[in-house]
Image (cartoon, rainbow, N blue to C red):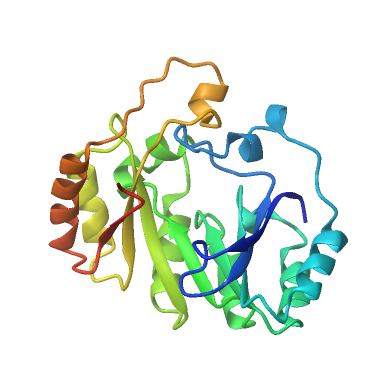
Amino acid sequence: MKIAGFVKTTLLDYPGHLACTIFVQGCNMRCPFCQNGSLVLPEYFEPLMDTEEILGHIRKRSSVLEGVCITGGEPTIMPGLKAFIRDIKDMDLLVKLDSNGTNPDTVRELIEEKLIDFVAMDVKSSPADYALVSGVPGIDIEKIKRSVDLIRSSGIDYEFRTTLVKGLHSKESVRETAKWLKDAKAYFLQSYREEDGVIEKLKGEELKLESFTKEELNELLSIVREYVPVAELRGVD
């Protein structure tokens, strides 16, 4: 496992549970609005943390912690992911996986082998706009669709989430995304925030991305709720 970040305690990353969060290094997407650019762009990679030391810390606190969140970067591209999760499950802890959905076979195996208890999938945009928003020309949208279908039918807890960015998302793309995720059991709209770690900023490109206003976000939420009634805004002041 290529671990580049570790948050020892969080009440936010795993809904309803006291957890820790592990950030893996490396991603197969290049979303220009990503705030974790140092985990995505190799030229900004930082030294890796020792996997056994991380497991040792979790083991010591396993009587206090309820779960572990594995995020990134993209965890499903890690060769050692299954073995790492098995070590965590041996501690009787819950595991939440954050994923971009590009590796449905891996997600399926993790679900079938009962290695994960919760999946949070970032749905970047409508299928038609996926290449633009993910920063990956020619992205295999069929794999993304398979992941969405798999997660919805898995029987485990899940959520979908979309980070909305003015300049990349429109009312129409938001509507098409909501149609695609119709009647999902949990869907969150998040607002883009400009931070130093944003990929487009790290690459030195002219920043063309903006946040939607709260009023605009509420308008987009209303559109989404026509198809996903339980949809909510997250992290919007």
Q: Is residue 202 above or below residue 66?
A: above
Q: Is residue 217 above or below residue 95?
A: above
Tell me if 125 is positioned left or right of 6 in this view. Answer: left
Q: Which residue is at the front of the view, 45 or 80? A: 45
Q: Which residue is at the front of the view, 202 or 234? A: 234
Tell me if 3 is positioned left or right of 104 in this view. Answer: right
Q: Residue at x 40, y 67 (%)?
A: 159
Q: Residue at x 75, y 36 (%)?
A: 46
Q: Residue at x 86, y 60 (%)?
A: 53
Tell me if 94 is positioned left or right of 49 in this view. Answer: left
- Give the x, y percent position of residue 109: 62, 74
Q: Residue at x 21, y 59 (%)?
A: 179
- Give the x, y percent position of residue 148: 40, 65
Please tell me how many numbered marks the rendered image carries: 0
Q: Which residue is at the front of the view, 177 or 218? A: 218
- Find residue 60 and report its image quarter: bottom right
Q: Is residue 208 above or below residue 120?
A: above
Tell me if 221 is positioned left or right of 201 in this view. Answer: left
- Give the x, y percent position of residue 188: 33, 58
- Give the x, y percent position of residue 174: 23, 47
Q: Which residue is at the front of the view, 56 or 165? A: 56
- Find residue 7 and report its image quarter: bottom right
Image quarter hosting the N terminus: bottom right
